[in-house]
Every structure is written in C-alpha cells, then in structure tokens.
Image: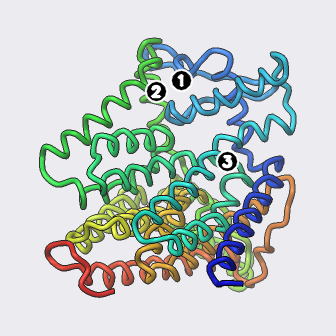
Amino acid sequence: MPSGDRARRWFVAALIAGTVVRLVALPLPGTHDIVAWKIWSYNAANEGVGRLYGIGGVPPEHRVIAYLHSETTVNYPPLALYELGWAGRAYRWINGGRFPNTTPLTIAIKVPAAIADAGFAVLLFFVVRRRIGEAAARWATIAYWLNPGVILDGVVLGYLDPQYALPAAGCLIAATEGWVVTAGALGAAAVLTKPQAIVALPALLLVVPGVNAALRLAAGALVTTALLVAPVVAAGGAANMAQALGRLASHDMLSGNACNLWWIVGYLVRVQYTVSDYGLWGAIVRPTRILQISRFIDVGYPNPRPIGAVLVVMAVIWALWTARRAKDLWMVAAVAAFTTHAYATLSAQVHENHLYAAPPLLALAAAGRPAFRPVLFAVSAIFALNLNLFYGIGEDVGYALPRGITIIDATVVVAVVNCIALVWHARVLRREASSVDSSGVTVNS
C-alpha cells in the first residue's frame, strides 16, 4: 500500500477513535459544575438571558435561580448562558416541553462544548493544510483530537472551555490574515464566553500593526459585545452583570485545585502548620487541599493576588518582547499558549481547568514549529493529570489515579513539574523567536 494511502487510513482511524471516545464520554456526569450548568440552562431556556444576573437594586441584586431542588447564582458572561440556553431549548423541545433531570440532559449540556471541540479540529485541519500542507494538518488535528486533556476537560468532565478556545484561536488566525474586525469580534466572543480567554489575546499585539488596525479590532470587539450584552442592558441588569462577573476574581482560594505555583505554596504552608500534629514525615505525606487566601493572610503571609498578577504580567510582557519580530501564525499561537500557561501556573485563584487553551494553541503552533511538539506533549500530560487526579473521569464515577502513588501528594508533584515545564516552555519560545529576523521572516528553524 502506498505510504500516502496508509497515512490517510491512520488519520481516519484516529479521527474515528477520538469520535468514539467522545460519544462514550458524553453521558458521564462530569464535575459538580454540571449542576450549575443545568440550572443556568433551564432558566435561560425558559426566560432568556437578560434577567438571569438580577435586575437593579442598591447594591445590585445578585439573583438566585433554581432548578428542581438546587439553587445557584450566575457568574459567567452572557455568551456562555446563551449557549446553555440553546441547549436547554433543544432538550425541552425533544421532551415535549418538559425538562426532566436525566442523563440526556447531561448530554445536552455538554453538546455545545462537543460542537466547539469538533469545530476546533476542523478549523485546525483546514488552516494548517492551506498554509503548509496536508501532512502537517493531519498531525496537528490528531495531536488535538486525541489529546487526553482536551477530551477530559470537555466531553468527559463537562467544562465550557472548548466554547471559548474556538473563537480565541479563530481570533488569532483572523488577525494573522489581516481580518482585524473579524478578529476583534471573535476575541470578544471568546472573552464573553469565559473571561480566561483574555490571557491568550495579548499575542494579537504581534500582528495588529498601527492605530487604524487597532481601532478596527476594537470596533469588531465593541459591536460584538454590544450585541451580546444588549438583552441584559435592556432588562436593566448591566450593573448586576458587572457585579456577578467581578465575583470571579474574589474566590477565597490560593489555588482552586490547579497544580501550579500556589498549590505548592499552599502545600508548604500546610506542612509548616501541621508538623506539630502529625510529625515532619506525617505532615509531608498528608494529602493536601485548597487553602483559603484569607487563612494564608491570617497566618502572616502577604496577599497572593497582586503577587500572582504581577508575575503573570511580567511573563506576558517578556513573551511579547521576546517574540516581537514574529508575524507568522505559529509563533502567534505559541505566544498565546505560553501566556495561557503562565497565567495557569503563576496566578492565584486559578482553577484546575484554566490551562485548557494551552494544548490546542500548542497544537496549532507545533504544526508549523515542530520544536513546540515536546512542549505540547508535556503540557497536555500535566493538564490531563491535573484533571484526573482530582476528578477521575467524573466525580461520581472514579478512575482517578491514586494521589499517594508518589508518596508526596501526586498533585504537588505535578505542580512542581508544571513549574519546571513553564521554564522549559519559555526557553523553547525564546529559541524559536530568535530564528525570526527584523522583518519577521524565519531565517532558520
């Protein structure tokens, strides 16, 4: 059989395998966040998005919404709510106007992420194929489609991250093509799905030259934002939405189960303060858990929020300066992946799923810059382990690797490895950026 035919067969087989895994995973219950998604979906399907944050009030009302016997508030941007509402309407229509809490509802809640997940694979394939050929496109697509972190985050555990990663990547691609208004619209769509998207978007500065281009980028973003928030504003809930989204930055967690720098800090603080109860070895090998920022400050340590913010800003500035001559899509994606990785590793209050966008963006970068392929594999493994160690393949399902397998809590070991990987990621980025001359042309690879 000719090698080209064999390669196509393997590509199709890999696509089928990834699709089968996703279909099998859709009915899994996911994490506790799925409960909130169901409540949001039910209410968005019944009354729209405009009033979900609350209406008016001094201070602004933070509305509590309910579904069956569960209640919650809303703290995500409106595009995520629209998507969950569309899924809820489809589910209600299929059920003849009813909205029972069943496994099919879980599947419906995950469908928008599954669609975005598949959309990213399609986008990746066609963009890479058009630019550098089919072989690279197949490699990048399979590196994404069979990526364990991508699969665990979306269709298995039910996070909404694929829904922001797709427009975020589309934003970067559009910008490198010179379609800056479209880039602005897609960037706004990404941020209005999940605010974490913003940490990938500084890479736009590499390819949006001049004031006119920046104004067109801003115009695309503002028009999209206006359209998406219009129902909320019309209902009188603008201040309520702003208050709700502001609560995302007020979580009292040093690290929200993210294997990052602050998870290590929290572990060391716990060792320090439990030695007297368990002895040195007992304190070292005890499973660690989330440490409240308020408690961290109470025992005499500084507020980690500004420290983490400064570290992230420094990492972003360093990446932009290092890659300032780069204009190709691969380096733009590489910078976006690095700033996402830096945020997930260095910022306080980060959650276990906030590294999500790094593997897809690294798959895009590695298609044209093979030096990023080992980084992609390492970051993907770190991300998948971070998710699995805490949640297995679902909170009520199990299959998590035992955290005691490494003697010291495995989440702490993964956090250390992640910090090391970030330094390595930076070195690879610097080396690849050095191959670009002052005109933005790659002189060696």
Q: Quadrant of the N terminus?
A: bottom right
Q: CA distance from mark 1 to mark 2?
A: 5 Å
Residue with the mark numbered 2: 241
Q: Position of residue 141 (x, y in %)?
A: 58, 66
Mark 3 vs mark 2, foreground winner is 3
Residue type marked 2:
Met
Q: CA distance from mark 1 to mark 3?
A: 26 Å
Q: Which mark is residue 371?
A: none
**For this rendering, which residue is in front, 306 or 75?**
75
Mark 2 neighbour class, 10 Å CA radius: few under 14, some 14 to 19, many 20 or more: many
**For this rendering, which residue is in front, 218 or 134?**
134
Residue with the mark numbered 3: 114
Q: Quadrant of the C terminus?
A: bottom left
Q: Earlier in the sequence, mark 1 or mark 2?
A: 1
Q: Which mark is residue 53?
A: 1
Q: Residue at x 50, y 64 (%)?
A: 358
Is 260 drawn above or below residue 107 in the view shown? below
Residues under numbered marks 1 and 2 in contact, where contact means CB atoms less than 8 Å apart: yes
Q: Earlier in the sequence, mark 3 or mark 2?
A: 3
Q: Position of residue 75 (x, y in %)?
A: 54, 34
Q: Is residue 88 left or right of residue 261?
A: right
SS category of the residue bearing label 3: helix
Which residue of the protein is positioned furthest toward the front in this rendering? 1
**For this rendering, which residue is in front, 377 or 367?**
367
